[in-house]
Amino acid sequence: MTANTQARHEALGLTRDQLLEMYYYMLLTRRIDERLWLLQRGGKIPFVISPQGAEAAQVGGAYAFRRNQDWFLPYYRDLGINLVAGVTPREIMLSAFARRSDPSSGGKQMPNHWGNRGANVVSGSSPVTTQLLHAVGIAQASRMRGDDVVVYTCCGEGSANQGDWHEALNWAGLHNLPVIFMVQNNQYAISVPLEKQVAGGSIAARGKGYGMPGVQVDGTDLLAVYEAFKEAHDRAMRGEGPSLIEALCLRITSHSSDDDQRRYRSAEEIEAMKAGDPLTKIKHYLAEHGLLDDAGSAEIDVRVKAEVDDATEWAESQPYADPEFALSQVYGEG
Amino acid sequence: MAVLNFLEAVRETLRAEMRRDKDVWVVGEDVGKKGGVFGATLGLFDEFGDQRVQDSPLTESAIVGVGIGAALYGSKPVCEIQFADFIFPAFNQIISEAAKMRYRSDGDWTVPMVIRAPFGGGVHGGLYHSQSVEQYFTSTAGLKVVVPSTPYDVKGLLAAAIRDPDPVLFFEHKGLYRAIKGEVPEGDYIIPIGKADVKRDGTDITVITYGKAVHFCLEAAEELAKEGHSALVLDLRTLLPLDREAIMTAARKTGKVLIVHEAGKTHGIGAEVAALIAEECLFDLDAPVQRLCGPDIPAMPYAGPMEKFYMLSPEKCLEAMRTLAQF
Ligand SMILES: Cc1ncc(C[n+]2csc(CCOP(=O)(O)OP(=O)(O)O)c2C)c(N)n1
Ligand SMILES: [Mg+2]
């Protein structure tokens, strides 16, 4: 790198510290997920659904938002979004172990059905894309109150065929609402590949029909994703309305711990994903620009591992809710 | 004290609640300048503007889903579904989201919203403008389901629904909109959700009903009185949660119970009410519990004679009530 050529992150206004923080979040996302698979294989937790291959899309995307001010309506793979929004590894593990103090639900919900009042992460469900309409409603209500809020919401490319997806984009487009719709296109919806799922092959192209820019971005390229989101977030803050961002991601793992992708993907295809691993790519970038040497990298590894260890041990030691907790919170007072 | 028809009671309550609380807003198809296809929001657009009286695109799932989002943010949407028959595109949002939000988030996230919808037949609406859809919702804990029968009850219950911390489905029988007038006090009042109301006291038989059928049963009770039988008419008003105490008290009082509703019989509200009475009041009964309900067919046909065949009437109610009284 010659001194007078600006590095990509600098051109985007990101400092070295910020970039390293993004890397830290990507690594944390990966390591938490790897730990969850171990716990699942060891019979300690029943279920895992994984962000592996989408860490750059999630962390790069989330980084454009304002913590504790903007709102998040993520989908099940969005571990990275949650962490950047301020949800802690301990809280993630509490939900994996379904403990009483799990902030998303007290153990009522499966893991990855995020929800964290303190971090403005809205409670989610299993039927895909219902949350997109909630995101639009939140944007509408916050605008009515004159609040400065941008809303993040997301789903996969298969889910982008649901009616609620289209209804949400149409409504946001009509009212020019500050919502950023991300689609993490990992080429598969469980076993069904993109070409059997999305007519025309492009989710981004649909944005035009709903009166908003639709951009496609390499979802394994942290800086490219950040750039697209920064632009969309700036537009939203300027009152220019919603954006659609299609991030081309990888799904490195099977759909979930209940799936085995070797039944519908070739060994070569699975192997080929390694080359595009977003973590490998960002590590390469950091090394190439002299931003992180081996010692620095090892330090982050140690820190992340310690956090994951702490979260796991602590969460596992926490109690379940009493069985009768099942009867709580059906109706409020009043 | 003003005399209002059922529809005016809906409108004036919406107006009063919107004046009272600036977080209350209405959203639905044609609710703006047109004031709704039945006129329930007529004039509100002029007073409150296009944000608080918002014409939605033609998308029921979004009307409810966006309403849920707004409620999560702390505002209080009153969503209008143009006809209850068209609520099904929003079914997932109601069942999977609105009903479960408080429960699944341990109370961190709640949905204080109202979904209003005109329902019911006898208006030449055919299969898709006549249905009674309440039974699809009454088995879902987390929802409240309200069906008023008089202008007085509309005001007290709609105000209660709007101020309620949970999602309330508010079903208005469209056959009552202009047909029923009544006195409505001008001041603020609430009728608690979950409380039934004895619309007519009596000693020989108990009729448990709701919606438009309340009026049929009251008319029939007048006739029955002339024949020497006294009927108690209990208006459920809220279908979820059911007023168990009022049902048991009314059943025990006469020992003879007839349940009447326009919605189909099988797996209907009547089945639940009858089961409750069987569980709690069996030895107070002097006759088997009876049900007079819509037939178990997919929906109400259009042609006059078939529609009439489907619909309840004072005559049908009288016949069922007389048979029970004579048991
Ligand atoms: C309405 C609904 N139908 C089916 C499912 C079951 N399901 C869960 S995830 C999934 C595939 C989703 O694929 P995609 O949207 O591409 O997201 P990805 O998992 O690939 O990230 C399916 C079919 C569901 N959760 N919701
Ligand atoms: Mg996918």
Image (spheres, helix red, strand yellow):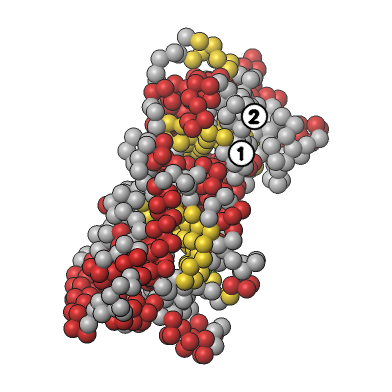
Q: Residue furthest top?
A: B1
Dot 1: element: helix
Residue at (57% x, 38% y) in the render:
B56
Q: What mark, if any, has residue B84 been given in the picture?
A: 1
Residue at (50% x, 44% y) in the render:
A176
Q: Chain of mark 1?
A: B
**Which callout, 1 or 2, points at the residue further toward the start of the chain?**
2
Same chain, marks 1 and 2?
Answer: yes
Q: Looking at the image, can residue B36 be seen? A: yes
Q: Which amino acid type corresponds to the residue marked 2 in the rendered image? A: Val
Residue at (39% x, 28% y) in the render:
B22
Residue A217 in the figure: left or right of residue A71: right
Q: Looking at the image, can residue B143 be seen? A: no
Dot 2: element: loop
Q: Which residue is label 2 attached to?
A: B37
Q: Is residue A201 above or below residue B191?
A: below
Residue B125 drawn at (x, y percent): 73, 34
Q: Is residue A152 above or below residue B181?
A: below
